[in-house]
Image (cartoon, rainbow, N blue to C red):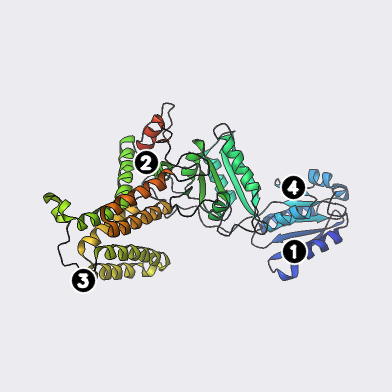
Amino acid sequence: MSDFVKNADENIMNFKDRLRFPANFDMLDREVRIGGKKAGFFFIDGFVQEDMVEKLMQFFYSLKPEDVSNIDKFLENGMPYTEVDRADKYELVITSFLAGVTVLFVDGFDEAVLIDCRTYPMRSVAEPWKDRVLRGSRDGFVETLVLNAALLRRRIRDTGFSMEMFNVGTRSRSDVAICYIDDLVDKSLLNNIKERIKKLNVESLTMNVESLAECLFEYKWINPFPKFKYSERPDTASAAILDGNIVIMVDNSPAVMIIPTSIFDIVEEPDDYNFAPMIGTYLRLSRFLFTIVTMMLTPIWLLLIQNQELIPSWLSFITVSDEITVPVIFQLLILELAVDGLKMAAVNTPSLLSTPLSIVAGIVVGEYAVSSGWFNTESLLYMAVVTVGTYSQASFEMGYAMKFIRVFTLCLTAVFNAAGFFAGVAVGVCCIIFNKTISGKSYIYPLYPFDVKKLKRSIFRVRLPHGKNN
């Protein structure tokens, strides 16, 4: 049974009352006559294409009474626009209206007409500032879900490609889209994801894709390694979909979530495939090496400094040459915090002041920090190498996971010497091996379960037998 009546005045009045029109300056309405019948348009300023609405109204003014005798005839003969729907429930109409859809009530219709001529404020489709590549596509996802869907559809022209829409949040009613190829995706995982999204009982997705991730997978916070791969690149997302993965998009978020994810997937980057196999393999192996160096360099150096008898003569240059006024462990921990401080300062500094900030940071943390006796040059050197290694891969989450394991191993090494170092390494390895993912697959797949073909593909940039390069 319809929530509306055939009296346009009553429908218009009830609709305004439910949406508290007098308290919202951006909610606009226009009452007109169509084919001799009273009608009311409702739209949100900033979400509507005003020129399109003007053209529709101009067309509606030319309709005759027989064209609006009932809603079926009106939609068939009197509606020139393509994206049109009808609804008889207040909840659906209000949700569509708040999402930017124009609502039309006509006298004699016990249903509302939904005209999707909306547009959203958005920035340009520019390359993401974090996921940059040396060669390849220069477009990136934006905060508008429809445009992001178009960027994927442009790359995947397959009849099996599907993008299913869901609404999450009793208050925000955020649009969430699940993207996959029907004959490639893991159906059990797909159904599991759908059921989890349908059962979500939250008021809003405050932080968009991150809020959805935490609602979908209630994991323990103690393991720092990322459970999902995030990307702002359409080419990365489309490659993942073509590989049988699931991509989840949330409206108002330029980042998409890729499921399932292993540690090899997170370390992988588009540049691996934008060059010839030999160059791509070199880039990938270099990134793997930097990942290991980033986690282990400073703990190993601290262990050798505390046990200088273990240092062979050809490595004697790694010892601290100047007098140590501040214990090495405190130097490294302070520098860890200083790097994060500089990172936050760089993010929050206006672009006009970024150069002065770099100069001040270089002088204070570099020259004056050494001459004042706070730090030794060796500590600064090794922390600089670690920082460069952290930025060698695109995932923020992976960078901070490596940082936490490194700091944890440093503290154990400083307190328990060699035993602490090996304990820290063991904890880091266990965090990787036993990390849980939403798909239920191993985080170190294809190492476990062992798949030689997949492992070869994960380590080396190779051409697959069926001719695909990704």
Residue occupying the point 40% across, 55% down = 400
Residue 19: which disc? 1
- Whether residues under marks 3 and 2 lie with C-beta atoms below 8 angstroms apart, the answer is no
Residue occupying the point 47% across, 53% down = 126
When the figure is inspected, residue 468 is found, relative to residue 8, above or below; the finding is: above
The image quadrant of residue 299 is bottom left
**In the rendered structure, which amino acid carries the disc numbered 2?**
Asp
**In the rendered structure, which amino acid carries the disc numbered 3?**
Gly
Comparing labels 1 and 4, the label whose residue is closer to the camera: 1
Residue 221: which disc? none
SS for callout 4: strand
Q: Residues within 10 Å of mark 1 (few under 14, many from 20)?
A: some
**In the rendered structure, which amino acid carries the disc numbered 4?**
Asp
Report which residue position mark 4 lands on. Answer: 85
Mark 2 → mark 4, Cα distance in angstroms: 45 Å
Residue occupying the point 33% across, 62% down = 336
Q: Nearer the viewer, residue 289 or 72?
A: 289
Residue occupying the point 15% across, 53% down = 309
Q: Residues within 10 Å of mark 4 (few under 14, many from 20)?
A: few
Report which residue position mark 2 lands on. Answer: 272
Q: Nearer the viewer, residue 436 or 75?
A: 436
Which numbered disc flags the more N-terminal residue, 4 or 3? 4
SS for callout 3: loop
Q: Nearer the viewer, residue 27 or 20?
A: 20
Relative placement, left or right, of 37 versus 48 is: right
Mark 4 → mark 3, Cα distance in angstroms: 72 Å
Report which residue position mark 3 lands on. Answer: 373
